[in-house]
Image: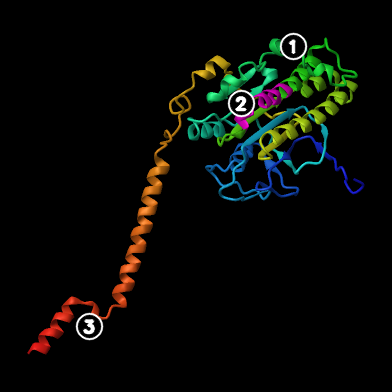
Amino acid sequence: NPLSVTILSRVHGDSLTILQAPDFVSFQKGDWPISGENIPDLVALTMGFSVKEDLSWPGLQAGPLFSRPRANVLLVVRGVNNLNLPKSVASYPLENPVPFTLDSVAETVHSLFNEDTPVVLQLAPSEERLYMLGKANAVFEDLPVTLQQIRARLSQDGSVLTSLPLNSLSRNAEADLLFLSEVQVLHDITALLQKHKHLAKDHSPDIYSLELSGLEELSRLYGPDSPQYRDATAILATVLQKFGEEVYGLYGKSAVVEVVTVKTFEAPLTRKSRSILESRQISNPGSPYNLAYKYNYEYAVVFNIVLWLMIALALALVVIAYNLWNMDPGYDSIIYRMTNQKIRMD
């Protein structure tokens, strides 16, 4: 089509880029900075959840009340100087790039949809850090987590090594393998979702948070002007775009995919790692995460009973008042009717 134009979005350093978003999640294009500590609240608002404090940021407008994305995928890429991404929904500068997690959003999803199969997956391959919740854990049990598992996966069938143009990247260097292992994890996540499409079709929302630091290691080892870093940056831009499009399609074009790029975090993120076996023991969302209350699934039923009963009583009161106001005492009231008859008899 001669009228089609490909627009590239060049991401410089610290930024938030919206790769994919459904039409009912309205991101406005503009140069509005957002703080790193507000990213979890932004993710919560895109999913239709409430936050403790209002996010006074004009980049996201309020959407329809009854429309909620099926998934939110947040990709955090460390060590980025600039990244050429194909046409995106919007991009914003990121200020105060402090480490953050989506634990609050994950706890909300798990507490509200505990009886369903929400996917709550937070993963950092470089730190071998895994955080999972919910009954969908069994699907991701085979996902390689440790660097040893991922390196073994790179030598198996369907490895990304057979399809990526490595150029200056080596299959034997430690930093190169770390970067390639993160690309492999992205590929395996979409492959598992392709195999278990029912997870993307249920009514419970899914949360993905993936932290990639392979570029940061390549920049530290080879330098930001090295051919290894340039080749890895080009590969990652292509892989991220493909990953976003595949997830967006798997969720029926009802998923938000964000990419947060930072040169480096201002402080290290400390967090206890969780293995898959440990995550399977998480069944009560009240005690392990210090939630304020456990969600009562009869709340919706009780709410509807009280709501419609009050509406019915209010309508009945209006009808009674209207009829009393327009009543003719001589014909409609038995008291006045008997009085008239008595008068006639006298």
Can you give x and y, in whole percent of width and height, for residue 50 in the image? 53, 43
Distance in Å between CA atoms under marks 2 and 3? 75 Å
Pointers 2 and 3 in contact (C-beta within 8 Å): no
Can you give x and y, in whole percent of width and height, for residue 82 in the image? 83, 33
User: What type is the residue that disc 3 sits on?
Assistant: Gly
Can you give x and y, in whole percent of width and height, for residue 201 in the image? 61, 34
Left or right position of 291 against 190: left
Query: Closer to the N terminus: mark 1 or mark 3?
Result: 1
Please report the residue visible at 69 percent of the width from the left and 11 percent of the height from the top: 149
Residue that badge 1 annotates: 151
Tell me if residue 28 comes above or below residue 97 in the rendering. Answer: below
Question: Can residue 261 be seen at all in this image of the molecule?
Answer: no
Task: Kindly give the residue lying farthest to the right in the view shown.
Answer: 2
Query: Closer to the N terminus: mark 2 or mark 3?
Result: 2
Distance in Å between CA atoms under marks 2 and 1? 21 Å
User: What type is the residue that disc 1 sits on?
Assistant: Arg
Please report the residue visible at 79 percent of the width from the left and 12 percent of the height from the top: 174
Question: Can residue 308 be seen at all in this image of the molecule?
Answer: yes
Magenta stretch: includes residue 192: yes
The secondary element bearing badge 3 is classed as helix
Numbered mark located on residue 121 in the image: 2
Magenta region, mostly helix, strand or loop? helix
Magenta stretch: includes residue 169: no
Residue that badge 3 annotates: 330
User: What type is the residue that disc 2 sits on?
Assistant: Leu
State the residue in front, 332 or 179.
Answer: 332
In the rendered structure, which segment of residues is drawn in magenta?
187-200
State the residue in front, 328 or 99.
Answer: 328
Left or right position of 107 against 207: left
Tell me if residue 308 comes above or below residue 278 in the rendering. Answer: below
Left or right position of 188 against 172: left
